[in-house]
Image (spheres, grey):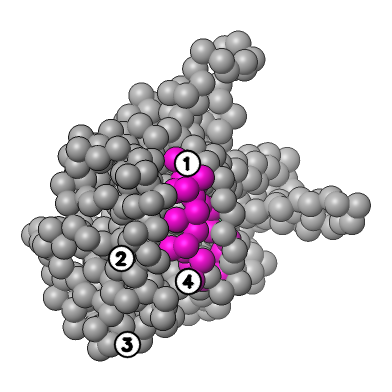
Amino acid sequence: MALEALIKKRGPIKKIGVLGMGYVGIPAAALFADSPVFDVVYGFQRDSASSGYKIAMLNRGESPLKGEEPGLEDLLKKVVAAGKFSCTSDFSKIAGLDAVTLSIQTPFLNKEDLLPDFSALKEGIGQVGRYLTPGTLVVLESTVTPGTTNTLAKEILEQESGLRAGTDFALAHAPERVMVGRLLRNIREHDRIVGGIDPLSTKRATELYAPVLTLGKVIPMSATAAEVTKTTENTFRDLQIAAMNELALYCEAMGINVYDVRTGVDSLKGEGITRAMLWPGAGVGGHCLTKDTYHLERGVQMLGKDLLDYPKGEPSLYVLARRINDFMPSHMFRLTADALQRAGCLLKGSKVAILGWAFLANSDDTRNTPAEPYRDDLIRAGASVRVHDPYVMEYPGVPVLHDLDESIRGADAIVIFAGHHQYKNLDPGHIRALSGKPHPVIIDGRNLIDADLFIRHGFVYKGIGRGDKNMHAVSG
Ligand code: SAJ
């Protein structure tokens, strides 16, 4: 029986499974369960030592996600109480479900060789394949190398199930577009890219996502186009940030303020002119921008290597952008060393306080935080380092302080790495007293503080992109 008939026989999507109870899977499952269109949603989670605890928490209606996620806890309580959502490690429950989505991390093992670590994804797809029944829709929500849905995913599902994609089951890619701190809102309000391996799969996947969208709409395309769309939107964001970081480095060298330039360039409006100038800073972290460029690069190697016409011997613009953004923590190290020298203090033996360990402002998310390579460089140079972050409760191998005064007491240098709002109104007089140094150093990696105010209080100031201030006269 062809897929169309199988889907017709099954009827509308009513029973859904979501594999991967993390930042993407949990809000997605809760929203599916909250929709009156669907009857029941299972969250599938391996009962492993590291993440098995999530199962019991979710079944109590509690969110295992740290940090503020507006509305998520209430929604979970509601859908669990209504019996519409439950979490399980029993993957056999996949059998008979109308749709199954996979939101599993897809990091890179080796970025130089463009080698992704698809081990967790393969395991998840294998689980789905083992219990797959005819007429089911399978959707990859994880960000993947272009071509993955039509090759790796399709092959594993067919191998494990003995069924044929596009004939016995539907298969699509509908990439997540969420940011921590606004997971539910992003799923409801962002347009949803939906790419099937064939039009019928796209149509069935549209039926799955349309009910949870409030402001967003479904944008249908092919599975590979959807994979390229997702990897591109993050690659281009990373590129825009890299362009700003390069400009910031130039402005420092030219003795001018990058933020004046940004305001100036951004003022050119109208006639369809868009500038979309993002912000320079201490670095780019997270699970997405730090790897999606490599998925796109690997995609063109896998799908278009022989057809690609590109300037001979020239590096990829996108990979260069990655390298510029990865360079920023080293630049923060350079600014710190130079400033300490201006304060008459050696880096070796100095005390440095890092403010903000999370990769993103006002979040607890520490994935690929740019503060880590910076801290490692300081320790290698013989400095002692304290880390403060109001949101990050703990981090393997790095003691995280939650008392700001304690983290600054006796410090030679205070270094702002994340743009948490708590650091916006730092009091220079109070900080100078805590530091106890004649000329404490303050490094602003997120343009949060008033440079002149700190300079007037005798600080040695340096800021990303602040060529207008970085060689200021030290007062007092
Ligand atoms: N950053 C800058 N300058 C900026 C913006 C960000 O230095 O102007 C830094 C941030 O400090 C952070 C990193 O870049 O360290 C990433 O920040 P982000 O705001 O991009 O946060 P992500 O990585 O959580 O979210 C991105 C978003 N992608 C796009 O906007 C294209 C989000 O929509 C995606 O859902 C998410 O990746 C993802 O999961 O792919």
- The residue at which mark 1 appears reads as 198
- Residue count near mark 2 (Cα–Cα under 10 Å), binned few <14, some 14–19, many ≥20: many
* Image location (x, y in percent) of residue 233: 57, 47
Give the number of the mark in front: 2 or 1. 1
Left/right of residue 416 with respect to residue 383 in the rendered view: right
Name the image quarter holding the C terminus.
Answer: bottom right
Mark 1 element type: loop
Q: In the image, what residue occupies the spot 59% across and 63% down? A: 217
Identify the disc placed on residue 212: 4
Choose the circle earlier in sequence order: 3 or 2. 2
- The residue at which mark 2 appears reads as 16
Instruction: Check whether the beta carbons of the residues at disc 3 and disc 1 lie within 8 A of each other.
Output: no
Query: Is residue 159 in the magenta section?
Result: no
Identify the disc placed on residue 445: none
Give the number of the mark in front: 4 or 3. 4
Choose the circle earlier in sequence order: 4 or 1. 1
Q: Reply above or below: 38 against 122.
A: below
- Residue count near mark 4 (Cα–Cα under 10 Å), binned few <14, some 14–19, many ≥20: many
Q: Does the residue tagged 1 have its C-beta within 8 Å of any atom of ligand 1?
A: no
Q: In the image, what residue occupies the spot 19% across and 42% down? A: 161
- The residue at which mark 3 appears reads as 78
Closest to the observer: 268 or 402?
268
Circle 1: residue type: Asp
